[in-house]
Structures are given as C-alpha cells and as structure tokens.
Amino acid sequence: MKVQKHSAFFKIMRVLLITIAVILIAAVVALFALSPAKIDPLLDQNGNTCLNGIAERVMIDVGDMELGAFLLGEDTDNPILLYMHGGPGMPALFMDSAHYYPERLEKYFTVCYLEQRGTASSYDKNMPLDKLNYELMIEDTKLVTDYLSERFGQEKIYLLGISWGTYLTTKTAHKYPDSYMAVINSGQMADAVRSERETYDYLLTLATENDDTKALELLRQYNPDENPEALTTADYLYNVRGPLVEKYRIGSSRFKTTGLMDLIGATLTFKGYTVPEKLSAYKSSMISLEHVGNSAPQDILYSFTQHEVPFFIIMGEYDYQTTTNLAREFYDNLDAPIKEFVLFKDAAHGVSDDYPQAFAQCVASVIGKVDTNRDSTPAANEYEIVAERDF
C-alpha cells in the first residue's frame, strides 16, 4: 500500500514539475517574442499605416554612450517634439497609450521619446556612476536636439518636459535658446523642499477630514517641524507620501492608481525593448533616481526667471507631486517672449494620463502661437480647461 501511495505521489509531482517547466518555457518564448526592440507602425484612424509617418527605435550617439529613443509621428513634415520623461529613470512610451487616440501628439508632431542616460534602453551596467548626472543630461538633450534638427531638416524643435523632465527642459532651453521654438512643461518643478511641505500639509488635512487614523499616525512620524530632513528621506517618499497621494488621487492621476505590477506588466509586454533591457528596467530606474534625483539641485524657482524661448506650463489642479501653487509662482516670476499657464481642472500630476486628447490639443495649440508660418491661435496669459474624460 505504501509503495502505491509513494508511486502516486511521485506521478503527481512529476506531472506538476512538467507543467511548471512547460509554463516557464512558454513564458520565456513569449517574452522573447515580445522583445524585438521595434515598435509597431503608427496607424491612422482608419487602421491604415500612416504613409508619411514614422515608428522607429533609434540609438543616438552622445559621445560617451548611445541613448535609446523612439520616433513616432503621422507625418515627418510636422514639427519635431522632444519628449523628456520624468523620474529620474521613468521612461514614457512603454506606459503610454495616448498615441492610440484620434487626438494625439503624433498627429501634430514627430515625437522623439528620449530615454535619458541610465534609463531602460539607455542603461549600461558598465557606465561609471559619475557619468550619471544632470549636467551630462543637459548636454545629452542638446546633442539629441542637434540629431533631430539635422535628420528632419528643422532648425528649431519643441521641448516637452514631464515632471523631472521639466528640470532638464528648463535648463537646456535656458543654455541653448537658439535651438528651440518653445518649452512646454507639465508638472513643472520649482522648489522640491517647499513642494514636499505643501504636499505633507495637504495630506494631513485630507487624512483628518477622512478620519484616516492610520495615515495620520504615519504622517506624524515624519513631522518636518521636529525633523526638517524628514520629508526628503526615501522611507517617507516611497512608503508614506507615495502611497498616500495615490490613495487620495492627488499623485500621478486623478482617476486611477498605477502600482508596481502595472509597471512590470507594461515593461514585459512592450515590444520596443530587448529582453535584457526589460530585465534591468527596474534596477536602472532605481539607480537613476538615486544618483540623479538626489544630486540635482531641484530649486529653480528663482534661478531661471529670464528666458529667450516661449514658455508654456500645463498643470493639474490636484497636482501634489510638483505642486501647482509653486508652478504658478515660477510662472509669475518668469520673463519670456510668450508665456502661458494652463490649468486643467480635476486633473492631477499626469495631465496627459487624465485627459490625453485634450492634453495633446493643448500642446499642439502652442505651434500657432510661436510659429508665424503656421495658423495662429490667440494667446492668453492664463486660463483653465474643464475637460471631459474622453476614453
């Protein structure tokens, strides 16, 4: 009897191990099939490939390394838009579904989604960490700009910065104004220390109003009045502030939360990466955040008030990642040939996630305001957009 039981047990275990092996092999095969380091052609609204469009992964030489980037657009005769992602270390395209909508950036621009040094396709495990700094990232931005200008035959291009990317666009355009038609920033960085205090105070208010005793207990452990450094610690930022701004919909989105599993799933299924790039994506993101985010001076509120380039700021009313009040203060002190401050009502930090089509139209409206060779749109110094969710 014991022999029969043992025999049955081993048969079950063998079947189980074979099943697990088959699943693992299938997963590996699927992963490689989904990792050609190419992106699908951009389709028009009838489902046809855009004949004069582009959908290409490129590696751009910036001297000491090559940076990965993705070029997407319906018509390569359109203006060029260099998209600078946030983070540091959080690339944009693999999580972005906005280019599937009728109104999209790619309808009006040829968009270059650059992956900053140390990020995903621009990550090199052998790169010395002293090569991972914001000064080199500014020079990278200019070299990529030169590449785009030469390739597409356009003397000047547009800069779009998202969150951390606004730091790079602000400084690059200030240093090299002759290369840019306009700076368009969403989630404008201004003063990281004051921003974190403002967010902390608002979280206390929300937790009190919602009788959220657990949140109140956590927040009080990081009272900045008792410890001025408390709000800059990784423990507070990742384990307290991060989860709470998502919980109260004042973080990345007003309408949804994005967790670690969402990021992992999007990374693994994105066709633009190789398998090694996918497997190192999270590690590279953390390295970038540590070595760039903690070293870059993030107070630019009064450092770059004079700009020779038209400057446009797009903010969400409920942005408590880079607070809207400080972005407005930055705007009020800004001297530029043309400037606008656009507030999306009922949006959070990721305006392009909350209202992708309205955001694309807002960015595209800049073209007519700064380019006399194209249709002009009346400019306003400051205005609000009340958009409806259109997806």
Image (cartoon, helix red, strand yellow):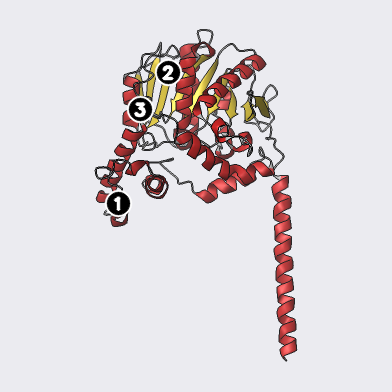
Depth check: give the residue in front, 339 or 43: 339
Residue 311 is tagged as 2
x and y percent of residue 100 in the render? 59, 35
Residue 327 is tagged as 3
Q: Quadrant of the N terminus?
A: bottom right
SS at mark 1 in the image = loop
Q: CA distance from mark 1 to mark 3?
A: 28 Å
x and y percent of residue 326 in the render? 32, 29
Q: CA distance from mark 2 to mark 3?
A: 12 Å
SS at mark 2 in the image = strand
Residue at the farthest bottom position = 1
Instruction: Name which residue type carries label 3.
Output: Ala
Disc nearest the viewer among 1 and 3: 1
Q: Earlier in the sequence, mark 2 or mark 3?
A: 2
Instruction: Name which residue type carries label 2.
Output: Phe
* Residue located beneath label 1 in the image: 221
Horizontally, residue 265 falls left or right of residue 17, namely left
Q: Residue at x 34, y 21 (%)?
A: 302
Q: Residue at x 36, y 46 (%)?
A: 248
x and y percent of residue 99 in the render? 58, 32
Horizontally, residue 139 falls left or right of residue 347, namely right
